[in-house]
Every structure is written in C-alpha cells, then in structure tokens.
Image (cartoon, grey):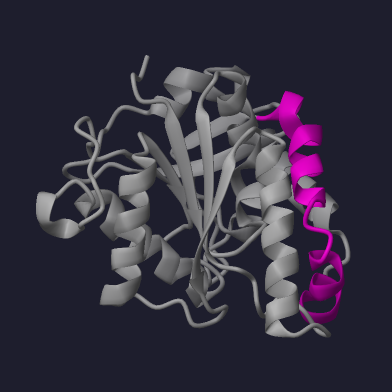
Amino acid sequence: MAANRTVLTFLAHPDDAEFLCGGVLCRLADLGWNIHIATMTAGDCGTMTDTPWQISATRTGEAEKAANLLGGKYHCLGERDLFVCYDKPTVQKAIDLFRVVNPALVLTHAPKDYMMDHEMTSLICRAASFGFGAPNASTTPLCAEAKVPHLYYCDPIEGRDPLGNMVEPTTWIDISEQIEQKAEMLACHESQRAWLREHHGMDEYIEAMKRQSAMRGTEKSVPFAEGFVQHRGHPYPSNDILVELLAHRADQ
C-alpha cells in the first residue's frame, strides 16, 4: 500500500474531473486518500450571458462544492479559457502546485482530445509531474519523500480522439456503486447546463456522463466504469496502482 496517499486531478476546467474521473475519486476517498482537484482555468468562457468575473466566481464556487463532497481541496491556476498554453510561466505554476500537493497519483487529460485547452493541460501536467522533484525547479519547498508519481490519462469525451477514433484504455475501473455519487458531484456545476445547451447542443449533462461510463462498463461487463491510459515511460512507475487499489469486477 502506498505510504503517500494523495491524488491530484490536474485538468483544464471546473467540472472536468467530475465528468471524467469522479468515480475513481469517490473510491479513493473511501480508502482514505487525500483528494486534490486542480483546474488550469476558472471557466471564464463557460457562459453565454455572464461576465468573465461573474462566471469565474460561480464556477470556482461550484468546483469547491464538488470537492467538499469528498473532503477534498480545489485549486485553480488562473489561466484563461481557450488560451491555456505550454509556456514557461504556466509550467512553473504547475510545478509549484505539484510541490505543494506532492501527489503519488495524478490524473490528467488525454494527450489528444477535442479541445486544445485539454491537450495543453496534459502536456503541462506531464512536464510538472516529471520535473517537480528536481531541486532547482522551484523555490517552493519540496517534500523529502517526493518522487515521480503514477500518471494516468482520463478518457476524452465519448472515448474518442479528435479524429473520431476510439481510445483503448489500459485500465478500466468499476464505478457502478459510485455512479450516483459521481452524478451528485457533477450536479454541483449547475452553471454548465445552460452553457452546454447553447454552445455544445448538449442538454443532458449528467446523462451524457452516465452514457460514457456505461459504454466503458459494457466493455468489462459491469454497469459503469471509467477508462484510463497509464503513462509508463521512463521514469514513471509501471505498476497499475489503480487496479492494485481498486481491484473489482472491471479489472478482471
């Protein structure tokens, strides 16, 4: 069992964690893990009516509410929607956050996803997870036990890459018993229903999440599951810690 029981979801926008990996977060919280949910942006473009400041305040409040359901902590790096960029200042912010949180397990976006904020966040997360332990990478204090964490990429929306190809997970986790708790977390993001209806043509926010979870569940003969691709390149751990921690029917 891992001595460090801290998980960090490092994703682009408020509600991404709840949609993509909320079930796993619920299961880890039940095991006593420390839950940290970080977003690159405050969701300032996630509205058709409010000002950037109004919607940002609303959305970060919603994110905090969702994290609180698991006794977790929410972090926002303060970047702008649609302008998340892999550059020196942003990578530095990410490294500093990693030093504060010191995660043993990190969940981020798929390297290829439907929007560039997600892809840039994935790259930034990969850079920070690799480099935050380097002594000269930050002036933020480094925990003595810090090491390269397990890194997983969440499913893109609908499990498809930007060209419409299905992504094949390396890891499926059964979240059948957590699906309603995951839905409760996602429902905290009330502001997004109107936005998704107007901009994405999607008026089934929670049902869309359940359909994706059911699709991954079908692949493992369980009602609901979440899919992940593990990053196993040097020097990342290669053992599948999600399966080791959360072994269930979907892992057989």
Q: Say left or right for 207 vs 178.
A: right
Q: Whole-percent x and y of residue 104?
A: 35, 34
Image x and y of residue 231, in percent: 33, 45
Comparing 140 with 94, the one in front is 140
Range covered by the magenta-colored residues: 175-200
The secondary structure that most of the magenta stretch takes on is: helix
Q: How many marks?
A: 0
| Residue found at x 48% / y 35% | 171
Residue at the (79%, 42%) spot, across then down: 183
Horizontal and vertical percent position of residue 57: 70, 68
- Tell me residue 123's x, y (percent): 35, 64
Image-based side of 126 in relation to 210, left or right? left
Q: Is residue 196 shown left or right of residue 10?
A: right
User: From the image, which quarter does the N terminus lie in?
Assistant: top left
Residue in the foreground of this view, choosing between 61 and 14: 61
Q: Is residue 226 visible?
A: yes
* Res. 211 visible in picture: no
**Rendered residue at 73%/29% (across/down):** 178
- Above or below residue 37? Residue 161 is below
Q: Nearer the viewer, residue 92 or 218?
A: 92
In screen coordinates, is 232 left or right of 79? left
Query: Which residue is rendered at x = 87% and y = 59% of the image?
Result: 204
The residue at the far top in this view is 1
Residue 234's image quarter? top left
Q: Is residue 6 magenta?
A: no
Residue 71 lies in what quarter of the image?
top right
